[in-house]
Image (cartoon, coloured by chain):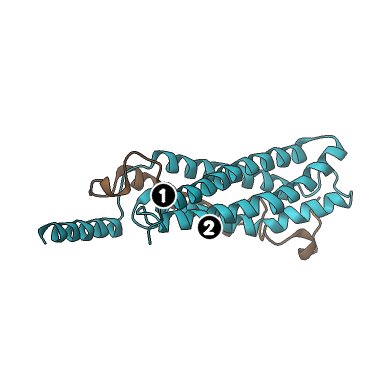
Amino acid sequence: MTMGPPLRKLVLTVHVTCSVGWLGAVAGFLVLAVTGLTSQDAQMVRAAYLATELTASAVIVPLCFAALLSGLVQSLGTRWGLFRHYWVFFKLLITVFATIILLVHMQPISYVAGVAADGALASGDLQRLRIQLVADAGAALVALLVTTTLAVYKPRGLTPYGQRKLRQQRRARLLHSHQ
Amino acid sequence: MSHTPMGPDHQATASTPAWVKVFGMIAIVLALVIGALHLTGNSLGGPGSHTLPVERGVRQP
């Protein structure tokens, strides 16, 4: 089913807002994770890790699902399709992968925040876990920049499924014009 | 996704574009590196990095 222009624009607006918001929230998370890892001020470290959990659970996770859902609606409701163009397909793969990794890593984020909330986080504690938070946020930022670039440039290339669909459409148009 | 002067139906059918091959190769290399790091226990969180220290009974220094 193809959406009409007003609905398509609305879904596109939601999708762009959620996707760019997700990117911005991850950038904010990265700053907090780096601050938590490098700051010498115990209060600042505590505040940074408390804020990482809040940012992840209240902003990043909802925006992540909203971006994924609105992207699915946008691609299935337009002639772009979900599996017809390589760039749409890659965007889907990256978004699904990033969502899974985010959900898996919510537990370490909450754990570090919990220890910080108890006031028991010394500068050398949970060092590997804290480095992991920085690395995860950095990797997520790169992945989201790739999806944004794909969405803006829309590099050419039809998947074998997309080529088959295009041939079917052309045949149908040809038959229709001869009738 | 659809705010482009070139619509979805106007793309030429051709063999797999070069950028797709490059993307695919990068994805395979990344998957192998991440898989190898996790299997050898060298990922940033260490072996079982998704299992929290408190659950393993180990408090990291």
Residue at the image point whose x is 38% and y is 42% from the top: A154
Q: Is residue A93 visible?
A: no
Question: Which residue was labeled with disc 2?
Answer: A69
Residue at the image point whose x is 85% and y is 35% from the top: A41
Mark 1 lies on a secondary structure that is helix
Question: Which residue was labeled with disc 1?
Answer: A5
Mark 2 lies on a secondary structure that is helix
Q: Position of residue A4 (x, y in %)?
A: 40, 53
Earlier along the polypeptide chain: callout 1 or callout 2?
A: 1
Q: Is residue A1 left or right of residue A44?
A: left
The chain identifier of the residue carrying mark 2 reads A
Query: A25 or B17: which is nearer to us?
Result: A25
Q: Colour of chain B?
A: brown
The chain identifier of the residue carrying mark 1 reads A
Q: Colour of chain A?
A: cyan
Q: Is residue A136 visible?
A: yes
